[in-house]
Image: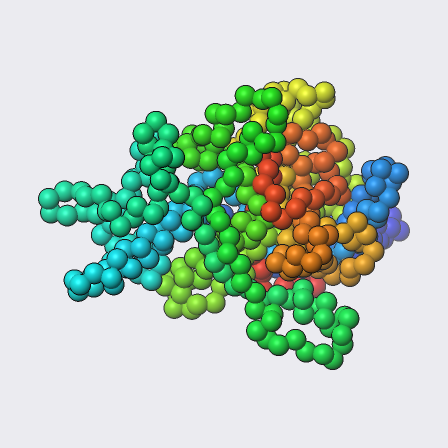
Amino acid sequence: MSRYFSVLCLAIFTIGLYSCQTGSTVPCADGTSALKRDLPNGMVFIPSGTFIMGETDGDKLINPMNQSKGVSVSAFYMDETEVTNAQYRQFVYWVRDSLARKLLAANETASSTPRRRTGPASGPARGFGSRTSTSGRVIFFKRTRSGIEIVEQLEPLFKPAEQSLFGVRELNDTILKYTYTWFDFPTYYENELNNPGQRIPLEDLIKKDEVGVYPDTLVWIRDFKFAMNEPFVWQYFSNPAFNNYPVVGVTWRQARAYAHWREYKSQAASSKRNKDPYRNQISLPTEAQFEYAMRGGKVTGTDFPMGGPYFRNKTGCYTANFKPGDGDYASDGSVFTAPARSYFPNDFGLYNIAGNVAEWTSSTYQQSFTTIVGDVNPEYGFDPTDRNNPAKQNKVVKGGSWKDVAYFLQPGTRTYEHLDSARSFIGFRLVSTYTGATTTNR
């Protein structure tokens, strides 16, 4: 009896040891102690782990350059869903209101009357407001004792009268631009590689970009010829009925500008609440982070993020929004995009990490990516303002979309688009750094 008991104990120990080595079932470290106290709004915690990056089960003859490689990724936070129209619209309105305040301040400075305080350094002007009519027209006004008056100083915010449609002057989206700066680490790395010991002046590494923030609503017409998609042009971004749908028509540069703005707003909120201006960085996910998140903690053997080689659940229902069969779009529940919180989440709690809309990553597309990068937090990125090398302008897109066949929903599949391209089937979600210490339990 004792001999059988010893064998049983040895088997249990061996299984536990193997599980700890692979990290697939029984984790040997618990990094959740700090994450619950500072979980960013709308994000979920993605623990650190190791996985096989690249195509593991696909046909290598189709894409022989996408070789598999063992990769380890540090813990991070990730948006639970794709960024929605309502969330991105807040960014557009913030830029609009900031511009409105500048116009009002400039008018007061030019006038002979004493300057009045109209609001904070950025954001909406105090005492002024806006409303959107049922036709989509944005009206700026100020509140007075006698009622509400239209502010003439805000005329530049609207398109000229000759461009009005049905007598309505729409918001001039061409002037809604967001300007921001960042530190160009990729250029620093590249210089260290090619010119070791030669330092680049700091001012050359601080880059600036000015980006128009309004989505390109015409993508619904441009992406699909001879299709009746005009209703989406008019309504998809502005109609409240689509508030919870993923935003589309956003370029890579616009997505990164949104990430910078959200980090700025997060820092401002943290400073106001805790008197501590520091906040974790917010950015687009790297290709490695996105693929790791798609796999839901599984090392390998996962054809689809929903688990296993199938895209139907036990009841026969589709578990993602894509193009089944020969174009039976309606069979998965949605002919085009679906609300961001649709279907079941993967094991990390991420909704639509595959399907619905494909998503931008921060990484620059390189065919032989896995053969040239390291195996810890790999990233291959370049300065998007560098126009000398067209190849550096292509950014990796992952996850597949509502118009793609099942192959593009596989974690190892990768495609790309130019950073200034906007598509009706590409959106994005963001990640935030996690700097908490991991405590072991052994």
Q: Position of residue 194 (x, y in %)?
A: 77, 71
Nearest the eye: 173 or 322: 173
Nearest the eye: 39 or 409: 409
* Residue, far bottom: 197
Left or right of 351 on screen, residue 408: right
Left or right of 109 on screen, residue 86: right
Nearest the eye: 235 or 47: 235
Q: Residue at x 38, y 49 (%)?
A: 96
Residue 39 in sight here: no
35 above or below 347? below
* Quadrant assignment for the C terminus: bottom right
Q: Residue at x 37, y 62 (%)?
A: 273
Q: Position of residue 39 (x, y in %)?
A: 50, 55
Nearest the eye: 199 or 2: 199
Residue 226 in sight here: yes
Q: Position of residue 418 (x, y in %)?
A: 66, 46
Q: Position of residue 190 (x, y in %)?
A: 72, 67
